[in-house]
Amino acid sequence: MELKDKKVLVIGMARSGIASASLLLNKGAVVYINDLKTIEEFDGALDDLIERGALAVLGTTPENIAEDMDLIILSPAVSSDAPFLKGAKAKGIKIIGELELGYLESKGTFIAITGTNGKTTTTTLIAEMFKENGNRAEALGNIGFSVAGNALKTTDDDILVTEVSSFQLETIEKFHPKVAAILNITEDHLNRHGTMENYINMKLRVFENQDENDFLVLNADDPILMSCSIKTKATVLLFGLKNKIDKGAYVENGYIYLNLDSNLIKICKADEVKIPGDHNLYNALSAVCVAGAMGVSAEVMKKTLMTFKGVEHRIETVCVHNGVTYINDSKGTNPDASIKAIEAMKVDTVLIAGGYDKHADFGEFIESAKNGKIKHIVIIGQTGDQIEKTALEHGFKNISRAKDMEEAIKISGEIAKAGENVLLSPACASFDMFTDYEQRGRVFKQIAMSLGGKNGEANS
């Protein structure tokens, strides 16, 4: 893409926006940066961009300048249907996101991982497999390391394992991964997409540019995904736990197998996968499909599956205090993700839940808590009333309310007994109280560790 001297507006100055603006400046573009926050609210985060020549339009929406641009880069947090983009659209100004910009300016081979849950773990696991295989590999995208920020450092030999969200897929045009994987689809982000149909269609965009030289990896046990009309030229590989699979990965007699072109490969025992829970076994199977399609050996896949410890903020053991294990699952940003964490608990557990309202239904989440090892729920955040109402409707009455994370941990620690767990798995986004799920998880960890806890193995 020719960017030199082009007038480019970057809307939304979080991490992806800052990375996009930096890339554009490096390519010689005339860069305008926009955000509803004022310059004071950024506390110096934009100073480098401004010193390098970026023109700041802050504390307002960009209607007055959007129609004068050659290109607009949109933050994933900003809907492509935002009213202030109407004039720019009418004039035919190209509007893309950071993912598309980064892709167009990158070398190397892209692998794209999407789905409602498990993306970060699977993206990281696959990247580790490629690194163990001797490849130059990076885990990028919605995982916290922007594609645009990495673009100018890439080489033709790079493997770019990229976590992509439905928000990012709204604004792709040419994004073309060699391998695309859809892990699962459950209800999420309806406050943004409006309907499940819209949400599903955004997820399916991940493979729209693939051809007969590519691979598409799909969850054979996901009812929503399997009910979709999948039209692709790519070679489809399936993964699942329920049935033997002709082309893809599955578990039989306790072993993980990969079947590619009638070449059946035994990888390892399913119980040798280090990260716990059936949901992580699905993640492992999807990773085996992706890595196998790209020629990674069974030995490398086995070693990685047996040693990979998981990612921060996803069923992460923080510490043990007075015999109680504190577990950080701040990455549980929707009910289905938190259900997976609840199902991974093997001992009685006090659950901390609640947060930003994404218009989710908490019925299944509460039923999972009721039927699992959850003895008590401590509720925080904007969705507190909704979660409590749903819990009472489902006959779950062991509920407390807390004004913040510190109080939630205090209450939980008083309820949990030695040999039990305190689990943070909010089933909600974090934006009502925190910058993102990472900050929420760090706060939980800091408070838990301040109790005098020590590192230890989880009771789960």
Image (cartoon, helix red, strand yellow):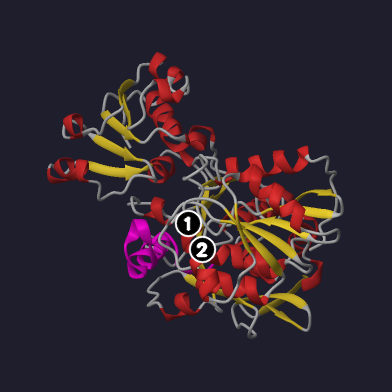
Q: At which x and y percent is residue 87?
A: 14, 41
> 168 or 361: nearer the eye?
361
Residue at mark 1: 383
Q: Which residues are magenta?
A: 181-207
Query: Label 2 amino acid?
Result: Ile
Tag shown at residue 297? none
The secondary element bearing badge 2 is classed as helix
Question: Furthest residue to the top?
Answer: 51
Residue depicted at x 68% and y 70%:
343
> 221 or 353: nearer the eye?
353
Q: At which x and y percent is residue 377?
A: 63, 62
> 307 or 34: nearer the eye?
34
The secondary element bearing badge 1 is classed as loop
Residue depicted at x 36% and y 58%:
191
Say above or below: 94 vs 366: above
**Along the horizontal axis of the image, is 31 left or right of 382?**
left
* Quadrant the N terminus occupies: top left
How many numbered marks does the figure carry?
2
Q: Quadrant of residue 401?
A: bottom right
Q: Disc 2 versus disc 1: distance between alpha carbons?
A: 6 Å
Residue 280 in sight from this viewpoint: no
**Along the horizontal axis of the image, is 296 left or right of 156?**
right
Dot 2 and dot 1 residues touching (CB under 8 Å): yes
Q: At which x and y percent is residue 193?
A: 34, 60
> 162 or 1: nearer the eye?
162
Residue at mark 2: 387
User: Is residue 80 located in the magenta-colored stretch of the structure?
Assistant: no
Say few, some or many: other residues with alpha carbon within 10 Å of mark 1 (under 14 / 14 to 19 / 20 or more): many
Q: Quadrant of residue 364?
A: bottom right
Residue 235 in sight from this viewpoint: yes
Query: Label 1 amino acid?
Result: Thr
Q: At which x and y percent is residue 46?
A: 43, 22
